[in-house]
Amino acid sequence: MIQNATTISNHINGKIKMSVVQGHFATSHSHINHYFDMTMLKIRQNDAKEVAKTIAKQYSYSTIVDTIVCMDGCEVIGAFLAEALKQNGIMSMNKHESIYVVTPEIDSSNQIIFRDNTKGAIYNKHVLLLLASATTGKTVSSALDCIKYYGGHVAGISALFSAVDEIEGQEVHSIFNNDDVPEYETYAAHDCPLCKQGVKVDAIVNSYGYSVL
């Protein structure tokens, strides 16, 4: 496992904690100098519920959310978020007055798609996009394009960690951001200063976790 992790807490909800490791890590889009381990936030019931409650508070009661699209293994948070939004008075236009929680499929060519049996949860719906992280913004942009392609209307973007404040004119709501880890940097793989200095890659990381090299 990755060593020398430190723990940071959310400044609004101290029950939400995330492990941070400094090093040299490779993602599918870039190289980064910090890895954020959000595993327990995504899979542990109490943690996921606290995250959902905090995210829900970031949206105005006038926001309409019909569907939550979960990326990066955020389905547990998504289910709690649907409940928290309803408790906070967020409206849903679905006839059953219940929010859909769906996960898209990523095919062999890395395209994000919805199958015929789930695309009805996107078409003409107000969709909140939920991700673990938004660093370069490429995954978020692809997901937004997918939602729009299937006829959805973007109601909001939420991430556990975001290095960007806005993507395609949409504010990115986050639990943690660059203010929590001011030393965080992301680099294009071909222009990574750590690689140029001969610093070995510690691990390959993605939304599923990490693989130490």
Image (cartoon, rainbow, N blue to C red):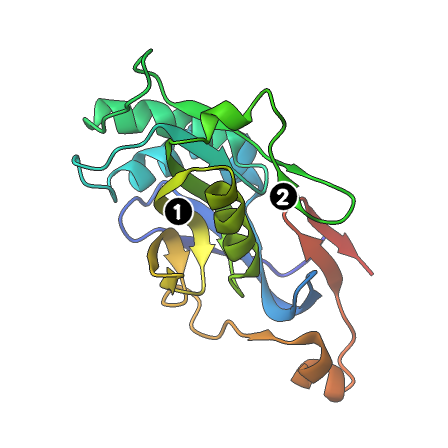
Q: Amino acid at mark 2?
A: Ile
The image's mark for residue 112 is: 2
Mark 1 — residue? 158
Residue 70: x and y in percent read: 51, 36
* Residue type highlighted by circle 1: Ser
Q: Is residue 26 above or below residue 93?
A: below
**Residue occupying the point 48% across, 75% down:** 183
Q: Residue furthest right?
A: 213
Residue 210 is left or right of residue 16, and the answer is right
Is residue 186 in view?
A: yes
Counting from the top left corner in percent of width and height, residue 213 is at: 83, 61
Q: Is residue 180 above or below residue 208?
A: below
Q: Residue at x 45, y 54 (%)?
A: 161
- Counting residues from the start of the chain, the first of labels 1 and 2 encountered is 2
Q: For numbered disc 1, what is the local secondary structure?
A: strand
The label shown at residue 100 is: none
| SS of the residue under disc 2 | strand
Q: Residues within 10 Å of mark 1 (few under 14, many from 20)?
A: many
